[in-house]
Image: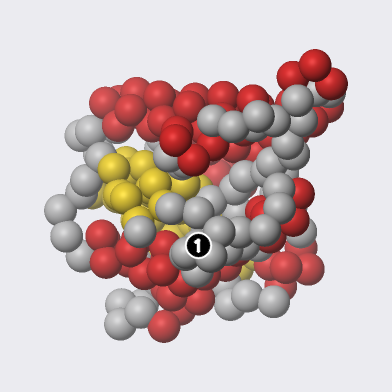
Amino acid sequence: MKALIIGAGGGIGSAVVRALNVAPDTHTLTLVGRDAGKLSALSGHAVPTDVASELEVQALFANLPPQDLIVYAAGDIQPELLKVATADAWNRIVDANLTGLFYTLKYADTKLNLGARVFVLGARPELVTFRGFAAYAAAKAGVAALVKVAAQEYKHRASLTLVLPRAVNTDFWRGVGKPPKDALEPQAVAEAILKSLTGEPVAELRVG
């Protein structure tokens, strides 16, 4: 099975990589992220890529064989109140969470094997609609809508699943505060994705 992990250097992405590497089935992994150092610490073929760049995403897929699994775990956050929010922060957050996904789905069109599975990390609305979370909440709402549309367009070739975990204990919290005491570990999300792979596709996968 050929698997593409986007955002592989992050907490959830790296947990998915480690879980796939010890899974009973053999996976050939392509690891995508901006930080080449983080990617090199993982087992798989590293392709440093900025998913906010259409040209880089296009080049990534041009050199890939057809894939059986794509996990989109890229993302970013920088809480800011609307009255002081900067365009740079807005663009960075929307690019990482939403625009990168748009480019990924655009160029994955011809690189998905029949029956391929695509998992996209989303966010539960009730967990992100707080003061300062405008850009992140808007981007994740866009992610949910984009996944629904893509599921219709790809329904004869691949299935898409929006992954909606409870709060997860990752570096995401550095710019937000402390994670809740009941926050999930990234491994729990990775294990839920692998378990879902063994069953029938679902539109949403709630974890925790």
Q: Which x, y percent locates residue 44?
A: 57, 72
Q: Which x, y percent locates residue 124?
A: 43, 39
Q: Dividing the image into 4 quarters, which one contains the C terminus?
A: bottom left
Q: Is residue 47 visible?
A: no
Q: What's the amino acid at mark 1?
A: Ala
Instruction: State the residue position of label 1.
Output: 183
Q: Which x, y percent locates residue 13?
A: 55, 61
Q: Nearer the viewer, residue 132 or 75?
A: 132
User: Who's the residue at 50% across and 54% down the image?
Assistant: 167
In this rendering, the count of numbered labels is: 1
In the figure, 62 relative to 151: above or below? below
Where residue 99 sits, quadrant-wise, is top right
In the figure, 177 relative to 132: above or below? below
Q: Dividing the image into 4 quarters, which one contains the N terminus?
A: bottom left
Q: Secondary structure at mark 1?
A: loop
The answer to whether residue 171 is left or right of residue 69 is right
The answer to whether residue 66 is left or right of residue 128 is left
Query: What's the colour scheme?
Result: secondary structure
Residue farthest to the left? 200
Q: Which x, y percent locates residue 70?
A: 43, 52
Q: Is residue 46 visible?
A: yes
User: Who's the residue at 71% across and 53% down the image?
Assistant: 177
User: Who's the residue at 61% across and 59% down the image?
Assistant: 179
The answer to whether residue 92 is left or right of residue 103 is right
Q: Nearer the viewer, residue 70 or 88?
A: 88
The answer to whether residue 78 is left or right of residue 32 is right
Label 1: how many residues lie within 10 Å, few (<14), some (14-19) or many (20+)?
A: some
Q: Nearer the viewer, residue 12 or 178?
A: 178
Residue farthest to the front? 181
In the figure, 131 relative to 8: above or below? above
User: Who's the residue at 42% across and 73% down the image?
Assistant: 20
